[in-house]
Amino acid sequence: MTIRNLDYLFKPSSVALIGASTQSGSVGAVLAHNLISADFGGPIMPVNPKYKAVHGVTTYPDIDSLPTTPDLGIIATPADTVPDIITQLGRRGTRAAVVISAGFSESGDEDGRALQQEMLDAARPHTLRIIGPNCLGIILPGTGLNASFSHLAPETGHLAFVTQSGAIVTSIVDWARNHGIGFSHLISLGNMSDVDFGDTLDYLANDSRASAILLYIESISSARKFMSAARAAARSKPVIVVKAGRHAEGARAAASHTGALAGADEVYDAAFRRAGMLRVFSLTELFDAAATLSMTWRASGDRLAILTNGGGIGVLATDAVIDEGARLVELEPETLDKLDEVLPATWSHGNPVDIVGDAPGSRYADALRVLCADKNIDGILVLNCPTAVASSVEAAQAVVEVAETGKCRNLLTSWVGESTAEEARQLFRENRIPTYDTPEQAVRAFMYLVDYKRNQETLMETPPSVPEDFSPDVERARAVVQEALSEEREWLMEHEAKEVLTAYGIPTSSTRLAETPRDAASAAAQIGGAVALKIASPDITHKTDVGGVVLDLLGPAAVREAAQDMMDRVREAKPDARVTGFTVQPMIHRPGAYELIIGLVEDAQFGPVILFGHGGTAVEVVKDKAVGLPPLNMRLAREIMSRTRIYNQLRGHPRAEAVDLDAIALTLIRTAQIAVDIPEVDELDINPLLADTFGVVALDARVKVKRDNRGGTGRLAIRPYPKELEENIPLGDGSSLWLRPIRPEDEPALRAAFAKLTPREVQLRFFAPMKTLSHMAASRFSQIDYDREMALILTEHGIPGKTEIYGVVRLIADPDNESAEYAIIVRHDMTGQGLGIYLMRRIIDYARDRGIGEIYGDVLRENDTMLKVCDIFGFTQSNITDEPTQVRVTLKLT
C-alpha cells in the first residue's frame, strides 16, 4: 500500500503527452485537444517525431529533447512501445504516468500479461507510478487538467469519482453537466496494474478538494489493502460504491452449505459494510447519491417531514418512507398549532403536510418555515405537482428563499412532471438544493445519508466485552487437521470436526464411533435413551442425501437394524464411498430451539468469510443468511445476526422466550478465530446449531481441509488481533502487568485511564488542556487497523474492557511505511519502574520488524522525562518552525 509519488499524478506542475497527434478522431488528437484547451497552469509538452506542433503547441521528437522534466507523462502509443517509454521517463526524472494504450493484460493472453509486467519492471527502479493501462485517463477540473480522451469536460466541484470503466466516466460527466454537479477528480483506473482503488482511496481521503468519494468497482486487486484504505477513508468522508457484475460469478458448486450460500456479491456487500462505505446498486442510484452529496449536507437522523400540494404524491412519498426504512416524523403540538395559523382549514393536519393544490409560493414558504423550526425533524421533503391554479416556479422560488435563511436542515425537493418541472429543478440546482424527478428517488436519497450516518456510528460503536474468557486449544485442533492431511483426506470425519469445535469452546453433542452395526448397538446401550445414528464416511458430506441419518432410535436392537439398513442404502447410493462405520449420539430434545447454521468458507477475493443463518435440512432453499469478514467481536457478530430474517424470532416474542444471543455471537467469534488460527481449514459447516434460551449446541459439523499455501493470516482481508505481541511484564515488587495490543473493547477502560491523568500529564501528552476523552476520540484510539497502526497497552490479565489501563504506546505509519509517528504515556502512579523505557523499546522493535524507515514524535520542550528517554534510544532532535514550544525527535531504523 502506498501513496508515494501520487502527488505527481494528481497535482502535476507539468505534463508530457507521448503520442500526441493531429489525426482527426485519433486518441492522441483528442488527448492533445483536451490537455491544451483546458485551463492547466503548467507547461504541456506534446511528443511525436512526426510533428513540429500540435494544436499550435511546440512538439518534441522524443522525451530526451523535452525542455523540462515533466511531473506526469500521458502515454498513447502502441502497447509494445510503452515499456521503453516508461524507462525513458523514469531516467528523465518523471515519477508518474497515465497509460491510455490498450493491449496488455486485459487481452487475456500471455503476451499481453508479459508486456504489462515489462512495463511495471521498467517503472520500479524509478518508483514511477502508473495509472492504467487501458484507461480513459484522469480529469482534475480544479487544476485545469484533462488528461483523458473523454469528449465531455466536467464542471469543477467537490466529488471524486474513481472507476475501472472509462465509459462510465463519460456517462456520469454527461449526467452531471445537466444537473449542475462538479468534480474534484475523475480517475479511470483501467487494468489497475499499479495504482488501484486502495491507493486512490488513501490519497483522496486526505485531499481536501474531495468532500466525498464515488467508486464504480468491477473487481479489486488486493483485499486487505482495499479494506484498510476504505475503512480509513470512510471515517473522514462519505464513500459511495456501486459494484458491477453482481451476478457474473454465478453460484459455484460446493460440497458444504456455506460454500453454496456465500456468493461473491454477498461477500463484497459484507466488505463494503465492514468498511463503513455506502453501497448503491445502479448508476441511477449513484447519480442520485452524487447529487445529494454534492450539496454537502448531512442527515442527523431518519425522521422525515413531507410538505406537498398534492395528497396523491404525499401518499407515494409516505410509502417510500416505509419501504426505505425511514420514519415519518410525528409533528409536535406546537408545530401543528403554528401550521394552523398559516394554512387554510383544509390542510391535512398531520404529516404529510398537504397544503392543498391551489397553494401559492407564499403558502409553501409559510409552512416550510414552521417545519424548519421543529428540532425533531431530521429532513424535509418538499413536493409539488403541477396545477392550473398555482405556479410551480413560484413555489420553487419560495422554497429557495426559505433555504437561503440557513435555518432549514436537510432539505430535499421533488417537482414531478417533465417540461413543467424543468425550470423549477434548474432553480434548485443553481441554489444547491437537492432535487429529484420522483418522490421515491428523493426518499431514497435521504436514506443514503441516514445509512451513511448509521455506518459511521457503527464504525465508532464500542463492542461489549466477551461474556467469558476465550482461550482455544489451538494445538489440539491443529493436530486433528494435520492428521487428516497426512492421510490425504479432504474432509474430517464428524467426530474429528466436533473435536476441532470443542477445542474452540463450541458446545457439541457427544459422539461415539462404531465400526459395525453390533458396535453401534453397544454404543446405544451405553448411552441409554433415544439416539441418532449417522453413517461415518470421509467421502460423504451430506449424509441425509444418501439416507445416512436416522433419528430417535430406541434400544440397541433398533439401532443395529437401522445400521444394517443404512449400510445397504449407502452402498447403493454411493458405491465408491469409503465407509468406516457409524456415529451414535444421544438425541437432544430441546423444545422450542431454533436450528441455525454457522459456517466458514474461503472467498477468492477476500479470503475467509463467516456465514450465519437459518439452518436445517432446507437451508439452501430458505436462503436466510448473512455473511461477514473475520475477525469478529461481539458487536460485529450481532450485526451479522441482525441481517437475517430469523433474528427477530431469536430475540423473542410474546409466545417464546429470547434465545441466548450471546452464546450464538460467541460461536460466531470462535468460528472466526478458527479461520484466523488454522489456515488449512478451507470450509466449515455447523448445521444444525441448536439455539434456545439455555445456550447452543452443535449437532452436526463438517470441516474441509487443504494444505496451506495462502500465507497464514495474510489471506485475511482484515489483519486480525496480533496475539504474538502479548507479553507478561514482571515488576520490581513481584507483581506483573500484561502488555498487549489494544482492542476495541478497551474504549471504556481507555477513557477511565484518561480520567486519572493529572492536568500536567494531559498537557505534556496532548499539548492542550482536556478534561475528558470523548467517546469519538477514544474509539479512534482503540478501534485501530492493525495493518497500519499499533497501540500497546499495559494492563492486567483478564477480559479486554474489564481491566485497568496503566500505560499506552502507539504508532501510526504512513501508507508507504516510510515513517511513523509515536506517542507514549504512563500513568503517574506507575512511574519510576522503567515502564516508559520498556514501552519505547517494544514499539521500536515492532516498527523495525514492520520495516518502517523511521519513527518520530513531537515533544514539548518542557517534557524533560520524554526527551531523556529519546536520548537513551538515540533519537535526534530538530526544531519545528511554526511550533517554538515543541521539538521533533526522530529515530532512523533503516
Image (cartoon, grey):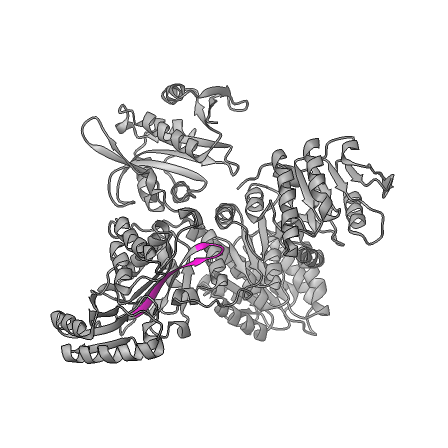
Which one is in front, 117 or 168? 117
Residue 290 drawn at (x, y percent): 61, 56
- In this picture, residue 601 sits left or right of residue 232: left
Position of 675 with respect to 43 (left or right) is left
Q: Residue at x 32, y 72 (%)?
A: 543
Relative to 394, say whether 570 is above or below: below
The vertical placement of 358 against 468, above or below, is below
Q: Estimate the x, y position of residue 176 in percent, counting from the top left.
A: 68, 56
Residue 374 in sight here:
no
Tell me: residue 363, above or below residue 808: below
Q: Quadrant of residue 822?
A: top left
Residue 381 seen anywhere in this rendered image of the structure: yes
Foreground pick, 456 / 230 = 230
Residue 514 location (% of width, % of height): 20, 69
Magenta region, main secondary structure: strand
Residue 723 located within the stretch drawn in magenta: no
Give how far across and how far down residue 810 sits, in percent.
40, 34
Question: Residue at 41% of width from left, 48% of height from top?
Answer: 460
Q: How many numbered dots are placed on residues in this image? A: 0
Tell me: 287 left or right of 448: right
Q: Nearer the viewer, residue 350 or 539?
A: 539
Please report the bounds of the magenta region as a residue range: 595-607
Q: Quadrant of residue 358?
A: bottom right
Note whether 736 is above or below 783 in the view shown: above
